[in-house]
């Protein structure tokens, strides 16, 4: 399930990453995550961690508050991942 804010944020990240001609792998190395994490964030499937938001804000030269505002509040579905029962 994707959230409207996470989709918008993902498009922002992808746009700015491509503008710098970085691959997802390169961006991931710069912010300390795997390329699969970048893929999930860009597609809106994953809500980024706070430290990732701060790293992205610094790399793209925007205030981290701007990114938090873009994401908006998390829904319960995003905050609490489904747990499997054994």
Image (cartoon, rainbow, N blue to C red):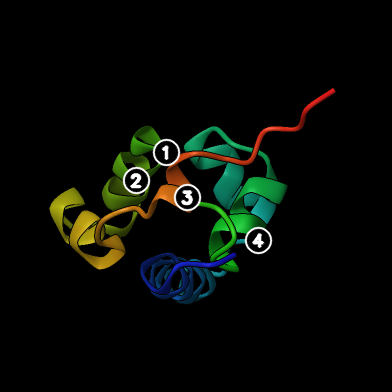
- Return the x and y of residue 21 as percentages of the image width and height: 56, 69
Which residue has dot 3 on it? 78
| Disc 2 from disc 1: Cα separation | 6 Å
Rendered image quadrant of residue 52? top left
Which residue has dot 4 on it? 23
Nearer-N-terminus badge (4/3): 4
As displayed, is residue 26 above or below residue 7?
above
Of circles 1 and 3, the one toward us is 3
Q: Residues within 10 Å of mark 3 (few under 14, many from 20)?
A: some
- Return the x and y of residue 60 as percentages of the image width and height: 31, 59
SS at badge 4 = loop
Q: Going 67% across and 40% down the picture, which residue do you hit?
A: 34
| Disc 1 from disc 3: Cα separation | 12 Å
- Return the x and y of residue 14 as percentages of the image width and height: 51, 71
Nearer-N-terminus badge (3/2): 2
Of circles 3 and 2, the one toward us is 3
Residue positioned most to the right: 86
Q: Going 46% across and 77% down the picture, which residue do you hit?
A: 15
| Disc 4 from disc 3: Cα separation | 26 Å
Which residue has dot 2 on it? 53
**Circle number at residue 73:** none
**Circle number at residue 49:** 1
Nearer-N-terminus badge (2/4): 4
Instruction: Name the side, left or right, on which 45 lies relative to 70.
Output: right
| Disc 3 from disc 2: Cα separation | 16 Å
- Return the x and y of residue 85 as percentages of the image width and height: 78, 27
Q: Nearer the viewer, residue 53 or 17?
A: 53
Of circles 2 and 4, the one toward us is 2
Q: How many marks?
A: 4
Q: Going 75% across and 32% down the picture, which residue do you hit?
A: 84
């Amino acid at each position: 399930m994707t959230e409207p804010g996470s989709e918008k944020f993902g498009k922002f990240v992808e746009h700015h990453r491509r503008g710098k001609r970085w691959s997802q792998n390169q961006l991931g190395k710069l912010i300390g995550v795997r390329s699969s994490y970048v893929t999930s964030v860009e597609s809106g499937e994953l809500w980024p961690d706070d430290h990732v938001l701060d790293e992205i804000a610094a790399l793209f030269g925007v205030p981290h508050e701007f990114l938090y505002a873009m994401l908006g509040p998390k829904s319960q579905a995003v905050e609490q991942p489904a747990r499997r029962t054994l």
